[in-house]
Image: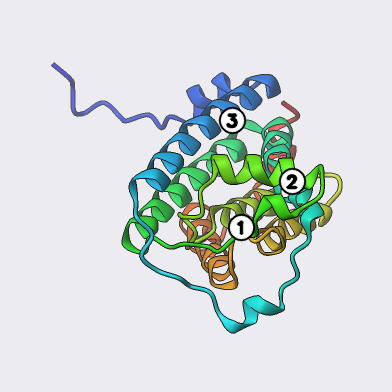
Amino acid sequence: MTDSSLPVRPPWPSLERATAQPLVRVVATALLGWGLTSIYTALNVALTPRYDFVLPVDAAVPFLPWSILVYWSYYLLFLLAAWFLAPRPYLRVVGAVVLASVLSWLCFALWPAHVPRPDPHSLAEPWRSLYGHLHAIDPPGNSLPSLHVALSLLVSWQLRRWPGGWLWPAWGSLVALSTLTTRQHVVLDLAGGVGLALVTGWVVFGRRPGLLSEHHRQGSS
């Protein structure tokens, strides 16, 4: 029988010890990404798109085939964050990523949307193959809000106090913009992703100063 008078210990110490090594955080991030992507893909297959959120302003956004390289650098950004962040900030970022994902899934179910995309066969190589692969693994649904936008902004913002400073948020911002120039999303999706990042950041991080300052208090990991 559990003694209810015993204090409840927070999970931070044990989780911090478990993620003390950078390689462990990288592997954990890869596994988390696989799990979240699997749910995202299942929803994309199960939900029938019913809405089209294309606005007149979307016609002014150029299609830049090469920007798919920026778009896919999103995954490298996550792995670098896992390597550089100290354990406690890393765990908070993981919490933000999971919360943002869950909130986005609810939005996908409420507003299943379709994004018109260019035909990869009209492109020259290597873009034809790259876009063909992207469209095969990511059908044109699950668009509002853009998780690519929300998560790249959340993660890159937490890296701004690391060496490189504002280059990290700049990278995250370029990834967010690439969702438009690859025709993976429309402007309203991007705006929804920004809003999701702000809400999630407020819930998880609140008014706390930049979490990477904890790295200096805790020492290198």
Which quarter of the rendering shows the N terminus? top left
Q: Quadrant of residue 25?
A: top right
Q: Quadrant of residue 49?
A: bottom left
Q: How is the image coloured?
A: rainbow
Q: Residue at x 39, y 44 (%)?
A: 45
**Is mark 2 in CB contact (under 8 Å) with mark 1?**
no
Q: Which residue is under mark 2? A: 128
Q: Residue placed farthest to the right in the image?
A: 164
In this view, 201 is above or below 58: above
Amino acid type at image mark 1: Gln
Task: Give the class, few, some or many, for how many residues have Cα within 10 Å of label 1's Cα (few <14, many ≥20).
Answer: many
In this view, 4 is above or below 160: above
Q: Which residue is under mark 3? A: 29
Q: Position of residue 116 (x, y in %)?
A: 55, 64
Q: Residue placed farthest to the bottom in the image?
A: 56
Q: Position of residue 125 (x, y in %)?
A: 82, 44
Q: Regarding mark 1 in the picture, which secondary structure is present there?
A: loop
Whether residue 206 can be seen here: yes
Q: Residue at x 74, y 36 (%)?
A: 80
Amino acid type at image mark 3: Thr
Q: Earlier in the sequence, mark 2 or mark 1?
A: 2
In the foreground, 26 or 126: 126
Task: Give the class, few, some or many, for how many residues have Cα within 10 Å of label 2's Cα (few <14, many ≥20).
Answer: some
Q: CA distance from mark 2 to mark 1?
A: 15 Å
Q: Residue at x 57, y 25 (%)?
A: 28
Q: Which residue is under mark 1? A: 184
Q: Earlier in the sequence, mark 1 or mark 3?
A: 3
Amino acid type at image mark 2: Arg
